[in-house]
Amino acid sequence: MEYAERLRAPLSWWVVGLAVALTFVVAIGYSAGPAAGLVGAVLAVAVVGGGLLRYGAARITVDGRGLAAAGCLLEWDYLGAVEVLDAAATRFRLGPGADHAAHLLTRSYLPGSVLVEVADADDPHPYWLLSSRRPVDLAAAIERARIRR
């Protein structure tokens, strides 16, 4: 494996999520009693925690098969040009410069991204736009693996 990254939710999202869950628990406990508050606490923490774990489970890998992102695979034969985008370029590609057919794996808490063109005429996606904590490293890993192939 040349590169692997999991797009985990940041700590601040966990703090806010648990604060919302705590608010929910206090409201239920106040209106329905401590037993209902305890049940609400367990449910709220499970829902918030499960949601954040699932959202942050997206994974990007570069290996012998190609580029994989959240369960989708772009094989080496169809992998085109790679471009590292900073925060401003990423916002442009998600806004006025977006192509509605693009394959996106983006996270608002990650400002940088990598744009990978799809070199397959039969693929409906012109490019993949992938958020990354280390977009320069991801692009370099793609290029290194392409050369080794």
Image (cartoon, helix red, strand yellow):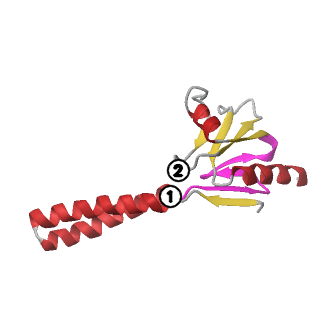
- Magenta residues span 56-79
Q: Nearer the viewer, mark 2 or mark 1?
A: 2
Residue 144, position in %: x, y? 85, 53
Query: Mark 2 touching mark 1, by CB under 8 A?
Result: yes
Q: Residue furthest top?
A: 96
Identity of the amino acid at label 1? Ala
The total of numbered circles placed on residues is 2
Residue 48 falls left or right of residue 72: left
Residue at numbered disc 2: 109
Q: Tell me if residue 36 is in the magenta stretch.
A: no
**19 versus 107 height, above or below:** below
Identity of the amino acid at label 2? Tyr
**Residue at position x 68%, y 35% from top?**
127
**Residue at position x 34%, y 63% from top?**
18
Residue 133, position in %: x, y? 63, 54
**Residue at position x 29%, y 61% from top?**
21
The mark that comes first in sequence, 2 or 1, is 1
**Residue at position x 28%, y 70% from top?**
42
Q: Tell me if residue 71 is in the magenta stretch.
A: yes
Give me the C-alpha separation between circle 2 and circle 1: 8 Å
Residue at numbered disc 1: 9
